[in-house]
Image (cartoon, rainbow, N blue to C red):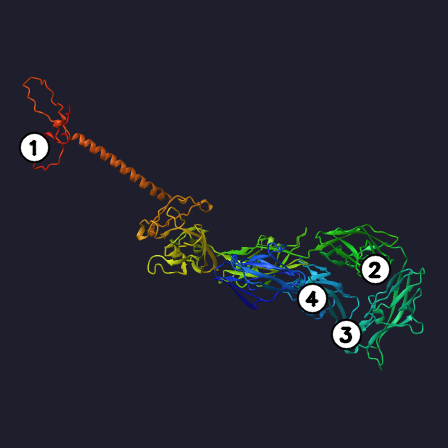
Amino acid sequence: MMANSVVIRLCSSSLLIPFGPVFQVLAGEEADITASMLSTEDADTPADELVYQVEMPTNGMVALKEAPEEEILNFTQAHINKGEVIFIHEGEESGGFSFTVTDGEHTSPLYQFVVTARPLTITMVTQEELMVFPGTRQLITSANLGAVTNEDGNEISYWLIRPPRLGRLILANDRNQFEEISRFSQTQLESGLVYYEHQIPEEPFWVVRDSVELTLSSQPAPDVRHILPITISYYAAHSNISSQLWKNKGLEIVQGQRKTIDNTILDASNLLASLPEIQRGDVDVVYEIKRFPDHGRITLDGQDLPRNAPSFTQEDVTQGKLEYLHGDSGASFDSFSFRARLKAEGRGAPSPAESVVLEEVFNILIKRRGSDPPELVTIDMLLEVLQGSMTIITQKHLNTQDEDSPPDEVHFKVTKAPRNGRLVDSLTMDPISEFTQEMVNRGQVGFYSDDSLSDGFVEFIVSDGEHQTEPYTLHIGVLARTLVLAKATEIKVKQGEDETLVTEEMLKATTGGPVEEDILYKITSVPKYAAVMVDRQATSAFTQKLIKEGRVSVRFIKSTSPRDSVAFVARSRAANVSSVLNITVQPLANIAQDPLLPQGALVQLDRKLLDATPLANKTRTSPTFTVIQQPRGARFVRSGGPGAGQPVDSFNQKDLDEGRVAMEIQNNPSGSRGGATKDEARFILKAHGVPPAECVLPFQTRPYNASGIYPATLLRIPSDSNELPGVAGVPRVTQASPRWRDGVDWPNGNAPTTASSDDNSHGKSRLSRRSNFWSILIPILVVLLLLLLAAILAYYLIRKNKTGKHNVQTASSKPKNGEVASTETFRKTDPANNIPMSNMDSKDADPELLQHCRTTNPALKKNQYWV
């Protein structure tokens, strides 16, 4: 409930705290503290750093959903935004807690969060009379029993206090069979499972009224008692009035006993049906005794009927004032006769209906005492009780038949007491181990359950003082008071898929007992864009058993929203819990997870970062990405062609494949002091024929390092770094080893990487670890090659210098024919006579000198050699 807002200004920060003055919670229950109730906004502080400090809770405690048993005094705005903070009421109706909000540097003044508890109440909204035809089953609907609580979704249980006289309540089970019941729920009533079955008597009646008294329960609301009136309508002609228009079953009695003659065995009140309803008020049925019984007496209100005017009315019979007292004779049969007619006081001539007189004999069967043993004729040997409460044991659970012993003489003696509770006297609440059938009939015997959920039993024997039965066992089943619900944060439906199965890992409710009940889930708020289905058919209710069998699924039926939610109530036989199940569309796309990108760079947005090709292949269209949240430290721009560098808010997969979209990352000089800065962009991914999906591209940024390797194509690097010429004027980034040269380790052991597009047709440079290797090796090879060339050149110059200093040859005398020269052809000359090498123009050179001073030896012909 939003009522006002408070703005707290702390220096440069502004904390906006809107909250309602009163937060209502159901008494004894828990409720979410949502952002609409308590919200703080600060322009320069994220939600997970805005801390609430709680002081002095007075009527409950603040806790987190994941640990509701542990009180907390600190939580953040992020906890509230995620729906993780709850308030659990305990104690007074009005209270709350004080709190302050801090962003780490500034703290708000003390504020008061007021919490009031509203009680849970049950209200009857419709209560029409139930009309039943003779011998038929009539469905009991919400028009007959329309009860609601002031809290939506709370289950209401109906407990039978007084069963109907002329029929019974039955429940239709899943095998199309009916069983008598003593309790049912509002859900079963609304599901069309609860019936009233009229048990037609042997005699025909016209109109008979019946009723059922019920207790309505919904913890922690106080119980409400209600009576459902029932009318059985008969169609019979007036001429059919006869002695069969009434009930005369006779009486069975044991020698020497006193027994009441009530309207279950003697009833002529249906004679009133022959009168108009407005005339029935002052008319009654009068019985006149014509012959008294031979072996006993008839008493009225404890006094013998006078012999001179022996009469009594139907009202006396109904109120249990008429009794037959046997005189303890040896006779086995007795009877008395009477006449019955309608009589109105203060009237003249009787009406035709009043003129009808019925004459009958009331038979009495007398049995010898102690001749018959007691017999247990119990209908149901299972007693279902609510955990931690008391349940009355009725004749449905313990009922005996003993022809010669009254109910107060039939004793039940417990031989094995139950382990999950105790038998008690419902009037005094004292434990008991022995009781009578009469106490059961009066509703005086109860079973008080302890807090355990284990089933148990009670073993007993039945005795009438002379006979004793074999041990009998009454089984006791415990119904859990609470229900534990475990559900996933959300159910993800993959984009383009027909449906997603709901598993027990996503949704499961349990009572926590040794025997699990089948939980019913009833949808209270129909989703707008999705549908919950059972066996691929839309449904408004399903069970835990159907989930376990893999028959419950969800699907999106409208392609207009990426998310939806469904509110439901999970119900066991005695407990319920309300919750909301979130359904989201999971994008059918490959999205990079936390890639590390350089600050100040222009990064190509391609399939390495965003790839909706799987969705494109499924829909045969080009999916569209629409930006719904720009990154804090980057922006999306057009890459290449007209409008290059302009911001873009929407692009498709074809744009990504053709390299027309890039992400420009800002420099962050005052950022995270050398560490990585986290950022993210959010998109809506759409394609024809499938629901849209929200997808997130999370990434990290860090100052650029030329030795880094980045998992994306860099179209531009920061201007203060060394750039290498790239393709088509785009600088190409050199590569380095997987570790920064300053020795800084990268997250997950991987250095930032850079890679060019795999598509060579786009003219982009391919940067890989191999090019990184050659970028280091090539300079070393160049230096070595220069050193080698310098060494060869030095050697060449030295060699050339040596060969240029020749010894001067002198012409020797030519030997005569046939003589052998006795002197050597070449001789060493004195170094002083060496002729230095010099550059000379060819026109000034002396031919003879050139002949003797050439720098290279003349080429040899074949078979020639130097000596």
Q: Is mark 1 on a helix, strand or loop?
A: helix
Q: Residue at position x 62%, y 54% from top?
A: 70
N-term mark: 4 or 1? 4
Residue corresponding to mark 2: 438
The crowding category of the residue bearing disc 1, from other C-alpha atoms within 10 Å (few below 14, some 14 to 19, many at least 20), is few
How many labels sit on residues? 4
Residue type, mark 2 in image: Glu
Mark 2 or mark 4: whose residue is earlier in sequence: 4
Of label 3 and label 4, which has the lower sequence position?
A: 4
Residue 140 has which mark? 4
Q: Do the residues labelled 1 and 2 touch (CB within 8 Å)?
A: no
Q: Percent position (x, y) of residue 246?
A: 82, 70
State if disc 4 and disc 3 touch (CB < 8 Å): no
The residue type indicated by label 3 comes to Ala
Whole-angstrom CA distance, mark 1 to mark 2, is: 160 Å
Q: Name the residue under label 3.
A: 237
